[in-house]
Amino acid sequence: MSIIIGVDIGTTHIKAIAYSEAGELLHEERVICKTIKPAPDRAEQDPEIIFQSLISLLQTVFISLRNESLAGVCFSAGMHSIMAVDQAGEPITNAILWGDTRSIRQARTLKDNGLAAEIGARSGVPIHPSLPLCKIMWLREQEPEIFSRSYKFISLKEYVFLKLFGKYVVDHSIAAATGFLDLHTLQWNELALKTAGIRKDQLSHLVSTTHSENLLLNKYRDYFNLKQVTPFIIGSSDGCLANIGTGVWNPGKAALTIGTSGAVRTTGSRPLFHPKQSLFCYPLTEDLFVTGGATNNGGYVLQWYARNFLQRELVSEEDYDWFVKEAHKVPAGAEGLIFLPYLQGERAPIWDAEARGVFFGLNALHRQQNMMRAVIEGVSFALYQVFQSLEESSGHIGTICASGGFVQSPLWVQMLADIFNRRIMVTNIADASSIGAALLGFYALGAIKSWDEVKDRIPEGKIYYAIPSQHADYMKYFEIYRNLYPALRTEFQKLGSLVRGH
């Protein structure tokens, strides 16, 4: 039986699964990743700790396979991480993660001088502090000594391949999330390079997501005790591979995930550029492109509220289900209370790192359950706003495939079906990105010729149908929700300047 190990390098966990060609999950391991937050606007990881955790995890999975036929290893990774390394390949910074917003001023400068629109038209990615482009600009301006010593700027996945194979390679999907890739040519964009003040040779060599490296450095071949040549397929980004893992590779379908953050994405045969640059577009394979938007504020918002207002930690799926059930003790609209969920700024569709959370409409009769309901509805409205932008680019989407821990709460899934006014099909896959990585690995090796060959391997759960009367009720409140951010945008910027002290 042929097996691929799918690895997902996330910001909270690294996961590794052994997945058979027949679609059977044979083994899985995971380890927690620690995020370093030296300041409120910083989010970093130590690349060496991440690498050591990953190879230890891989070794455990290799041992578990015993005499099974290992076909290869394929990688998924979070987007937007960036680190500087010296000429010896040694890190001279930590990996700066997607949630790091230190480069707010650099992103705003690009928007003010018009370069954001010009670069975004080529890259397919809106300018935002999460982009490595903006983070490198920050390093150049704020850490000139480190910037001048930097030989290359690479992501965490690139660091893994550098350590294992001694090569600087980056797949098109991870590269597209930097802001430096020209989506039209799949080459580095000279304007973006000039804007950041770096050269093309300071970035890695571009390769397709099906590219493989076969010659492990001797010390790692011995560490893994691999007797035969094993392809290590570079793979793609976690968001793109979550679409594959949930069976979203045809028009008319979208993937909806809610974890710490959240996202809505669809897949098409060509790049899609939103007219207002509200969405991203990433290449997956030579004929598949993933378009969508991610929100910074998913399950994290519920955790924040429970911790700070209920003195309760949301740890298990049962905890989240309790939160949603409590919230449903009041009707849709939370009796006139609306919540903007921008606790960590926001990406799609507003792309404003200075946006903040707001309870709007509080009165003396509102209770704890009203606020809990408004919190869930705020997260759901944010995702619906992304969905609306997605349909503007891709056309009508009839089915939404939902995955993530939130699907264990039927009330929340039904709420989303009612808000979106679409049927939602729950996909019973816990780790869609690592499953997607394994499937991409089989595709890269030729074991899968067409994605439709594997549609029966995606386990489907319950289907939720929208209730039209509920949708109509939600839309009355959504109309107010949608108008709040434009009304407050200037005040958010003023507040941000006060907090930063300038």
Image (spheres, rainbow, N blue to C red):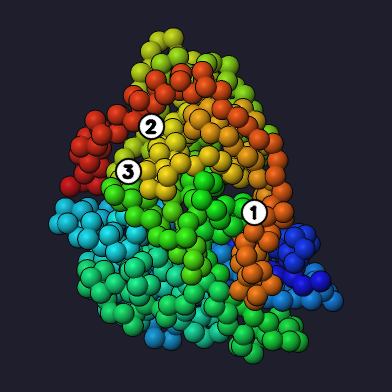
Q: Amino acid at mark 1?
A: Asp
Q: Amino acid at mark 2?
A: Leu
Residue 304 left/right relative to 461: left
**Which badge, 1 or 2, comes first in the chain's sequence?**
2
Q: Position of residue 76 (x, y in %)?
A: 56, 64
**Which badge, 3 or 1, comes first in the chain's sequence?**
3
Q: Position of residue 184 (x, y in %)?
A: 34, 68
Query: Mark 1 Cα within 10 Å, few/some/many (few <14, many 20+)?
Result: some
Q: Which of the 4 image quarters holds residue 336?
A: top left
Q: Position of residue 151 (x, y in %)?
A: 35, 82
Query: Mark 3 Cα within 10 Å, few/some/many (few <14, many 20+)?
Result: many
Residue linked to disc 3: 350
Query: Mark 2 Cα within 10 Å, few/some/many (few <14, many 20+)?
Result: many
Residue linked to disc 2: 340
- Looking at the picture, tell me which residue is in the foreground, 447 or 373: 447
Q: Which residue is most to the bottom?
A: 218
The alpha-carbon separation of the residues under discs 2 and 3 comes to 12 Å
SS for callout 3 = loop
Q: Which residue is most to the right?
A: 67
Q: Which mark is residue 431?
A: 1
Q: In this rendering, is residue 134 above or below 258?
A: below
- Looking at the picture, tell me which residue is in the foreground, 292 or 330: 292
Camera-nearest label, 2 or 3: 3
Residue 6 left/right relative to 494: right
The residue at 52%/46% (across/down) is 252
